[in-house]
Amino acid sequence: MTETMLTVSQLTKKYADKTALSNANLQIDQGEFVALVGMSGGGKSTLLRLIAGLEEPTSGVLTFAGGRPVIRVMFQNDRLLPWMTVLQNVTFKQQAKSLQQQGQKMLALVGLADFTDVYPAQLSGGQKQRVALARALMARPQLLLLDEPLGALDALTRRNMQDLILSVCQRQQLTTILVTHDVQEAARMADRIVVIKDHTNLYEERVRDHQDPAEVAIVAERVLQEIVGEAS
Amino acid sequence: MENTAVLNKTHSLDSQLKRPRWRQISWQKVLPWIVPLTLLVTWQAVVSFGWVASSTLPSPLAVIQDGIGLIVDGTLPKNISISLYRATMGLLIGGSIGFLLGFVNGLSTHMRALTDSSIQMLRNIPHLSLIPVVILTLGIGEIAKISLVAVGVMFPVYINTFHGIRSVDPELIEMGRSYGLSRQALFTKIIFPGALPTILMGLRYALGVMWTTLIVAETMAADSGIGYMATNAQNFMDMETILLCIVIYALLGKVSDLIAKNIETLALGWQQQKGVH
Ligand SMILES: Nc1ncnc2c1ncn2[C@@H]1O[C@H](COP(=O)(O)OP(=O)(O)O)[C@@H](O)[C@H]1O
Ligand SMILES: [Mg+2]
């Protein structure tokens, strides 16, 4: 039995006369991992930013069953503070002992226990995104929003980060929404793939078993067809 | 560069025997001194060989002797400290006003709309052109000179604080906000550190303005200070003291720049990582 966390109905966002998102409808369950895929400019980030509360909708409603959860967003660029060390970035330089310990713990979780006192400029792109992940996990969020955080990484690092995010989300039973333009990534990671096309969502696909490469490939192909197919 | 490569490849003991450490650093330390020392020696030679009359250009030794005399009779320490006092007060007052204005205008759209265009207009008035106004209204007392320095220092600090704050990456601010930072934390952890490099650049520039303004102010209207010493010496055709004052300006400028540089190194240590500088 699953409980609904979030319901999006007729959600619309306009910038001046430009429509970024138009009548999106979506329901997301507790603990679910949903991927939003689609072509660039289709409105994926807009939907994510509306859910995150970073933007106000032009119309439509967004309801969280059981009140607004703790939400953390991981952005496409790491958005680390260059003037703080890795640990300081994660704790926002707060001195409380419990926070320091929690920070150490989260950094260990993402495999950066030995990098606490290093500045972001000394890290690789993948390591920076690990720090950003640790920072996002600090507040024990109930909803994790990922806006193409792996977009800039090389294939191997990307694969490792996918596995890391998956294991963290499973262990903490996090509800997760991942925006990506990579259908393979979506099929590997998500329970459900929602296609955002022409600024709305009309199609989705479930992935029953991520461990099964054949199913992952088939789902990815179907989703890709849906995205590029019958392009106007 | 080649030397360090050698050092890295072989055992450090061996390489130290082959290439003593002092040889590697010495050139870097010596180079900056070559030009000033050559100038000094040339200057002394020109005077010693009588190519220029020593009344027109006294020798470095004569200037130093003059300096020692003025130190012993207390004139120099007294005038340096009064100049330092004026410079520091002007910097503190003008710097604080500039910083506060830049800070408020950088953060508040309303304040920006209210004051920024006026400040931009005032900024185009060369502050030294205010000297007659200042003398007429404030006389030639301490307040007059400190005000002039403060006005001169205020604008570079204002402009740099304002631009520093305005140009902080909005994505970082958005991240901080969505990660639950309070307004105060947003400022102390993101906006201020993000603006600091630009603010410190303004401070460094302001230090230069500070000395120039003070010298001019002391030359035109003062009865103490280094600028006054130079003007006074001019009346007595005392070339040694005039040159001494110029050397002191150079030293004071150099020292304040060094202090500013050290503050930068301390405050912006994170930029030194990975050789950004
Ligand atoms: N702040 C904004 N101002 C104006 N237009 C925007 C803004 N943000 C997004 N858009 C527009 O909305 C559309 C959807 O953008 P976005 O949600 O970022 O797409 P995606 O993430 O799928 O690539 C694009 O056409 C984009 O240009
Ligand atoms: Mg996007």
Image: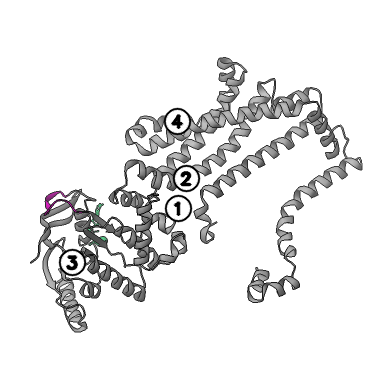
Q: Amino acid at mark 3?
A: Val
Categorize mark 4 by other alpha carbons within 10 Å: few (<14), some (14-19), many (20+). Answer: few
Q: Are marks 3 and 4 on the same chain?
A: no
Mark whose residue sits in front, 2 or 4? 2
Q: Amino acid at mark 2?
A: Leu
Instruction: Read off the residue under disc 3.
Output: A34
Q: Is residue A144 magenta?
A: no
Measured in 3D between alpha carbons, the distance from the residue under mark 2 to the one under mark 3, in whole angstroms, is 41 Å
Mark 4 residue's CB less than 8 Å from ligand 1: no
Which residue occupies the extreme bottom position in the image? Answer: A214
Q: Are marks 2 and 3 on the same chain?
A: no
Mark whose residue sits in front, 3 or 4? 3
Residue sitting at 19 percent across and 79 percent down?
A: A216
Measured in 3D between alpha carbons, the distance from the residue under mark 4 to the one under mark 1, in whole angstroms, is 35 Å
**Marks 2 & 1, CB-CB < 8 Å contact:** yes
Which residue occupies the extreme front position in the image? Answer: A97
Which residue occupies the extreme left position in the image? Answer: A1
Please, is residue B231 above or below residue A72 in the view?
Answer: above
In this view, the residue in front, B195 or A100, is A100
- Residue B196 badge: 2
Q: Amino acid at mark 1?
A: Trp
Q: Is residue A65 magenta?
A: yes
> Is tag 1's residue or tag 3's residue first in the polypeptide sequence?
3
Q: Are marks 1 and 3 on the same chain?
A: yes
Residue sitting at 29 percent across and 60 percent down?
A: A137
**Marks 1 & 3, CB-CB < 8 Å contact:** no
Q: Position of residue B76 (x, y in %)?
A: 75, 29
Q: Which residues are magenta?
A: A57-69
Instruction: Read off the residue under disc 1.
Output: A83
Instruction: Read off the residue under disc 4.
Output: B121
Check the residue under mark 4 and report the chain it is in. Answer: B
